[in-house]
Each structure stands twice: as C-alpha cells, then as structure tokens.
Amino acid sequence: MREDNEDTERNLIQQYARRAIERPESAYRVLLYVVTAFFLLASLFPFYWLFVIAVTPNRSIVDMGLLPKGFHPSVFVEVFETIPFHIYMLNSAIIATLTTIVVLFVGSIAGYVFGRYDFPGRTPLLLVVLVISYFPGVAFLIPIFQLFTANIEFLGVQSPMLYNTPWSIVMPLSALTMPLIIFLLSTFYAQIPDGLEDAARIEGSTRLGALVRIIIPLSAPGFATAGILSFIIVYNEFFFSYLMVSGTGDWSPILHGIFQFQGSQQVAYDLMAAASIIGVVPMAILVMVAQDYIVSGLTQGALKE
Amino acid sequence: MGSLRLATVTKQYDDVVAVERIDLDIADSEFISLVGPSGCGKSTTLEMIGGLTIPSEGKVFIDDEDVTDLPPKDRDLAMVFQNIALFPHMNVYKNISYGLRIRNTDPEEIERRVNEAAETLQLEGLLTRSPSELSGGQRQRVAIGRAIVRNPSVFLMDEPLANLDAKLRVHMRTELQQLQRKLDVTTIYVTHDQEEAMTMSDRVAVINDGKLQQIAPPLTCYNEPANQFVAGFIGSPSMNFVAGSIDGAQFVSENLRIDLSDADYDGVTDVTLGVRPEDIYFADAEPLERTEPIDATVDVLEPIGEKIFVYLDAGLEEATSGDWADADETVGRSQFLMSAPSESAVEEGESVEIVFDRTSVHLFETATGEAIAHDIVSEPTTPTR
C-alpha cells in the first residue's frame, strides 16, 4: 500500500483524485467554482459583447475580435438623439406596470383562495392553473391576434380592436404570468396563521378586508417578489411585445425601439447594441435593489409547504 | 344587551360530527364556560357563535335575532383567541383600535376609547410598542383591550389563558373575572381546565364528544353531576369509580359491599359507584353519615402540602366505562384515590380502614352513564344547593 502511495505521487491527476476522495469537500469547492465561472461567463459574455459592438464605430464592425475596434462611447447618447428611445422605455415600463397591477390584483385574490380556503375541487383547479402555466405563450398567438384585431365575432359582438394598444400586450401576458404569481402568493398566504384572519373578521373585516389589511401586509416579501418577477417577465418578453404592436404606433415597447435602428439599407449595429444595454439597465438596477427581497421571497415560498 | 341562544346546533365535517345538537340558552351578562377535553367540540361551538364556522344544522340567536347566516362582523361580538392573534404589523394602539377604525369611528372617539381601555388594562405606556416587544401577559391584555374597546354585546374567549405560565394564568383569571363583572357583558369562555371553569363562571357547560353533558352552576356540576363523564371531569383529582351491581339493596363489587337500603335507585341493577377523593375518610374520622369500613392497603403517598393524596388498593377491579366516556380522563385506576388531611399518620404499605361519606356517594347506571342518585341517605336530597 505504501508503494501505491508513492506511485500516485508520480501522476498529477491521480494525486488530485486521491485528495478528492479523502477530502470530498475540496472537490465540491472546485466544482462550485467551475460551475459558477461557467454561468458567469455564459451570462456576462453577451453583455461584454454588446458593449464591444456598441463602442465600435458602425463602419468598423467587421471581423470582430474580442476587443473593440476603436472607442466611441457617445453612441449611448446618439441612441436618444436618433430616436426617442426613452419613450420606448417608458412604454415598456408602463406595459409592465399595468400587467403587474392586473396580475397582483387577480393573483392575490386567487392566491388567497388557493392558500387559505379549503373548498371542493381545490386541487384539480390548482392543477389546471399549473397546466396552463406550462403552455407556451406562442401557442395562443394566432387566435389572440385575430381576437385583438377585431376579426372575431361572437354572439353578434365584434371583438375589440386592441392591436397597437398596451392592452394587447398586457392581457395575454397577465394570463401567462398569472399561474406563477398565484402559486407564489398562495404559498405565502398559507403561512399566515388562521387566528389573525379570524381576529380581523371578528373585529369587523370582511374576508377581502382581512386580505388587504392583514394578510397582504404580512406577506409583503411575497407580494413584492411577485410584483418584481411579473414586472421583469413582462419587460423582457419578446413575442407579444413584438407582434401585438406595429412598431410605428404610440405604444411600441423597447423591442421596437431597438428595431428602429435596423433600416432596409443599413443596420446600425452599434446603436442597436447600445440601446440593448440601455434597455437592460433599469432591470439590472431593480434586481440589485430588490435582490434580497426576491431571494427571501422565493426561498420562503419554496421551503414552506 | 347580549342574550344568546343556540338551537340544536350541529356541525359536521365530512364523516366527523364535531358538535351534535347542542342547545344553550345564555342570559344577558352571564359568564358561561364551555369545558371539556381536547377535541370535544367546545371551540367549534364558540366559532359557530362567532360566525367563523357556519353550523350544518340549527340556529344561533343573539338578542333573539337569528344570526346564523350573518358574517362575524355583523354580530356585535368580540373574541379573544388562544394564540392571542395580535396583528404583528401594527402597534398596540392600532391593534386595539382596529375594529373601531374599520367601522370609520370618529378619530377623537377612537382615541378616547383606546385610552380608556388602556387604562382599564394598565397598558398606558405601551401603546406605541409592537406586539413582539411585549410580554405574554401584556399581549394577552392587548388582545382583551381589542375586544372590550368596541363595547360588544358578547365576549367570546377561546382558552385565552392557555399560553400563559401558571402564576400569570391565575392572576389573569382574577382580572378577567373582575373585568367581566365591571363591564357586565355576556361572556362565553372556552377552556379545557375544569378549575378555571369552576372558579370563573356563573354556569358551566360540560361538553364531551360534541354533546352537551350538563349545564349548571359550578357547584351543581360538582355535587350533582348529570352523568359519569361530568362526575369524572369536574373536580380534581377526579372521582373514583367502581363498577358493580345492586343485589338485595346492596352495592356489590368483589370485596366491597355498601348498604343501599335508603337510596333511591329506581330498580337499576348494573351501576357504577362514584366517590370523590375528598369524600373518603379513614374509619377513625367521624363524618356524619358513613358507610361500613373497607379494608385497603396504602400504595403510594403524594403529599401536596395542605393534604396528602393517598393511593389505596382495596382489591377492586378498575371501574369500567361505557362507550360514552373519554376513557383516559375518567377511569383506568385500579386504585382508590383519597384526599386525606396532611396530618394523617399513614405509611406506604400500611393496612387501613376507609369509609365513604354517604351523603356524597354517587350512583350511575353503568350502561348509559346517567346519574341515578347523588347520595345514599334516606332523606330526600335537596334538589339544588
């Protein structure tokens, strides 16, 4: 055995393997670093690449390497000079806010019912909600498009013309975000002791009053998490944001702002990249500010059944 | 005003009947305790009065108004919960004033009433604290404050003292009683502690297995229990039971024979004899009416200060219980428990002679548990005390 010991020292890999078997935690740590590094690279490299493209003057964007060819930071100002990019950002924020309001309003009531009420059919209904959350949103695209462009008549009622309004994005996205929010909020609401709600009701609240005055304030982390998540999801969404507005109307989101730099003759890659980075900034700030909330919100919801 | 009536109220959950046909008639400003073992349906009964649970059958009346289908907020009652249930995100002032604020009471009126309640409950300095900064007793006071500030017509209390330590509990018990007398509000008090029920209430409603066993003033429950369950539940330590039969005007059970020639037992033959530990004496003591002496051996002595609990082996099989009883609460002793004066000079293992006080020997029909007689003395018993 001792001879084996000496043998292993000859080979670096064997030596490492031996150490990893003796002290598995060191191997785990190495693994953690490797995996973390991979994820960091995978998620941060696109931003670096965007930055490289953005600061490189447009005519130099050929055969790009890892480093920018030239340095042209004024592109970030140019974005706003060329088009009213801040309006597109505002549109996106408004659409995301509207969706968040709808989702939180409906989702908190639904979450309350699922989290605190035991009624016949509760489990099947929750399952249906879960199933819907697995549907790809694109699957609904064509029927919804027809519906929102006043092409469907039901019982003699013409469907409304919502194309090119924020509602054409808000409504489908609310529906798609809803299951997640219902799940999140119901786990939060389920944790509030029954006694508090009973007390509020005895004191004179209705069930809805108790929800607003007692249960929601006490599940503030969950409520905030749900709100931030739905905001981010909608802000980042592509399909409906792209297809439910023409891009020339008043309600185009960031996405269409970025596409404005894509002309028929020429593509302003540097401006597109710069606009993309600018578009991400509000979300990055939001996540950084709220990350404690989000993490505690998600893990609390996950840990407590 | 706050009279309350339950008319054959039943609550059924799927297969389980939590409360079965309970009738209660509670007068204005009365203090009633609902007492019984855990899971007997007393809390469910209270929740149905409060409107937190809707009865499956039967009706609830407050001041002769049918409130069965009214939500809690429209019933004009207040409740103190076992887990206290203060709103953790509100300070004491906001907790107490919650009900008033919900009802859009005038802010000056709110302030006046909260201060008044705070004064009554000695909470003046604590109004801006949050519940997490309070001690158990203070929290309990805030919960009571939240209840009294609205001047409701009925108070519901669901084991409000259960989470307090023993000393504070006795203290709060007195305070609650004084408060109830002062405010003169109908109070329904749920507890599993028969001593609490006995000391605080005008009347005690003993509930077991979802059914009302007896509702009577505390001492009536103690002296004239309606059935074997009440007999075993009320009084601590609980009553001794011996199953036996009546044979030739004698209660017969193995080596125990008691003359029943003076008792009125309605021709029932299978009976259970019940005698409280405090109604057992050594043969050399001199109660007024006594049974014939019984030989017994002292098993265990438990001195508790003012008296000694003496566990006696009288060579008897343990008493049986009918289906109606909660077995572990009432029976299961093959020993007799006697509560003797602390100066009694007895030793473990010693042979003694004991006698029962004939005026306090209870007879129950074994099959149903119903009380047959509450003494075995010739004179007709006084019906109430």
Image: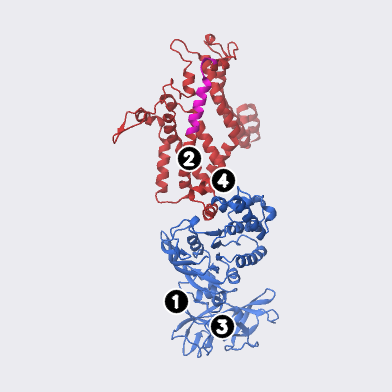
Chain colours: A red, B blue
Sequence-wise, the earlier of marks 4 and 2 is 2
Q: Is residue A1 above or below residue B381?
A: above
Please name which of the two marks, 1 or 2, marks the residue nearer to the observer: 2
**Which residue is label 3 attached to?**
B360
Residue A168: x and y in percent read 41, 29
Mark 3 residue element: helix
Q: Are marks 1 and 2 in contact (CB under 8 Å)?
A: no
Same chain under badges 1 and 4? The reply is no
**Which residue is label 2 attached to?**
A105
* Badge 3 density bin: few <14, some 14–19, many ≥20, Cα 10 Å: many
Distance (Cα) linking label 1 and label 4: 51 Å
Horizontal side of residue B7 vs B96, given as left or right: left
Same chain under badges 3 and 1? The reply is yes
Residue B182: x and y in percent read 62, 66
* Badge 1 density bin: few <14, some 14–19, many ≥20, Cα 10 Å: some
What amino acid is labelled 3 in the image? Ser
Please name which of the two marks, 3 or 1, marks the residue nearer to the observer: 3
**Which residue is label 4 attached to?**
A218
What amino acid is labelled 2 in the image? Phe
Q: Residue furthest left?
A: A156
Mark 1 residue element: loop
